[in-house]
Image: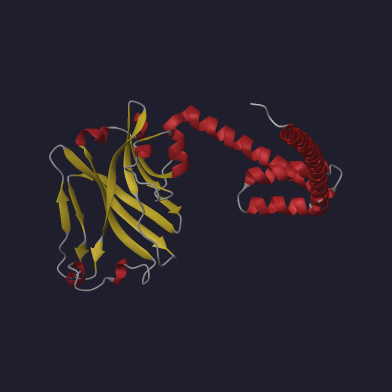
């Protein structure tokens, strides 16, 4: 079939227009790409200039005096690591300033404290559990603790009332015994409470959890208070500053001959039943606990 000449002409004109349009589109696209790249480059330059300006402003704001005060505030909040970094920056940037001299003195104190701490750690490591002394009177948080009269006994008596002089008591099984004694808690805080005490034993060179101490009131002002008819003011830190307790830890009789550690946690947040406290390292004992009493110390 023969295509008429006028149709051929139209087709040729259409193709030429389309080609011209594509060429123009490509030119426009290339132009926009070039403009975009130029804007990106300008934006990067502006960012770099902004960062330089921020650094300059930071340097103008953070004078030696400001840096020193920042470091002291960090020290006050016990953020010693960042405090020392701030002091070191101060010394590096402003070595001839008076603040740098003070900063160097503080840095030397940090270094001295670290050296002392390391020496103490080495001493504890060398002596092992023998390093721990008795602290039957100690302070933990808002309370002062006084533990006395520790002894072994199969019978644990507590809670004597002032009316009929009756006591609660528990009897250990024949292969067990109680390590029992007296404890007083003194505090200025009305929200104070009795602490968590535990008994550990040294066995095969490890300090192993043995028992939690039961903490019971030593006495009641009356039998009525004892059976819950009314409150006993002698047990309320809102009313008194000191409360008397009886304490007892149940253990196997065979453990009586082992070195035993009566300890109190510095922080009650973690339970003695936590796997972290099943066996204590020397470091854990030193950092997390106060040793109240060491029994059979000569066998360590």
288 relative to 19 in the view: left or right: left
Q: Where is residue 250 in the image (x, y as percent from the top left)?
A: 23, 43
Q: Furthest-left residue in view?
A: 174
User: What is the basis of the colouring in this image?
Assistant: secondary structure
Q: Can residue 42 be seen in this view?
A: yes
The structure residue drawn at horizontal position 74% and vertical position 33%, both measured from the top left corner, is 15
Q: Where is residue 282 in the image (x, y as percent from the top left)?
A: 44, 34
Check the picture and name the quadrant holding the N terminus. top right
144 relative to 88 in the view: left or right: left
127 relative to 98 in the view: left or right: left
The structure residue drawn at horizontal position 58% and vertical position 32%, both measured from the top left corner, is 119
28 relative to 232 in the view: left or right: right
Q: Position of residue 33 (x, y in %)?
A: 78, 38
Report how many numbered discs are placed on residues in the image.
0
Above or below residue 59? Residue 108 is above
Q: Furthest-bottom residue in view?
A: 230
Q: Position of residue 111 (x, y in %)?
A: 67, 38
The structure residue drawn at horizontal position 34% and vertical position 48%, both measured from the top left corner, is 197
Name the foreground residue: 206 vs 100: 100
Q: Is residue 132 visible?
A: no
Check the picture and name the quadrant holding the C terminus. top left
Name the foreground residue: 5 vs 231: 5
Residue 200: image quadrant is: top left
């Amino acid at each position: 079939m023969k295509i008429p000449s006028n149709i051929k002409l139209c087709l040729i004109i259409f193709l030429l227009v389309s080609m011209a349009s594509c060429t123009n589109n490509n030119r426009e696209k290339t132009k926009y790409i070039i403009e975009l790249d130029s804007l990106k480059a300008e934006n990067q330059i502006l960012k770099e200039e902004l960062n330089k300006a921020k650094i300059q402003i930071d340097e103008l704001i953070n004078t030696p005096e400001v840096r020193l005060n920042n470091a002291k505030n960090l020290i006050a909040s016990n953020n010693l690591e960042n405090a020392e970094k701030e002091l070191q920056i101060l010394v590096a940037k402003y070595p001839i300033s008076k603040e740098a001299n003070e900063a160097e003195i503080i840095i030397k104190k940090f270094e001295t404290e670290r050296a002392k701490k390391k020496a103490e750690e080495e001493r504890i490591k060398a002596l092992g559990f023998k390093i721990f002394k008795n602290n039957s009177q100690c302070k933990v948080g808002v309370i002062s603790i006084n533990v006395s009269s520790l002894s072994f006994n199969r019978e644990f008596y507590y809670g004597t009332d002032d009316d009929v002089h009756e006591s609660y008591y528990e009897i250990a099984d024949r292969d067990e015994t109680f390590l029992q004694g007296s404890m007083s808690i003194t505090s200025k805080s009305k929200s104070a409470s009795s602490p968590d005490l535990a008994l550990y034993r040294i066995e095969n060179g490890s300090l192993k959890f043995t028992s939690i101490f039961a903490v019971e009131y030593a006495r009641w002002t009356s039998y009525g208070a004892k059976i819950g008819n009314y409150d006993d003011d002698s047990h309320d830190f809102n009313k008194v500053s000191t409360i008397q307790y009886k304490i007892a830890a149940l253990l196997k009789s065979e453990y009586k001959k082992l070195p035993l550690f009566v300890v109190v946690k510095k922080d009650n947040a973690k339970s003695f039943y936590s796997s972290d406290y099943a066996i204590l390292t020397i470091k854990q004992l030193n950092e997390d606990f106060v040793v109240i009493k060491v029994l059979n110390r000569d066998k360590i």
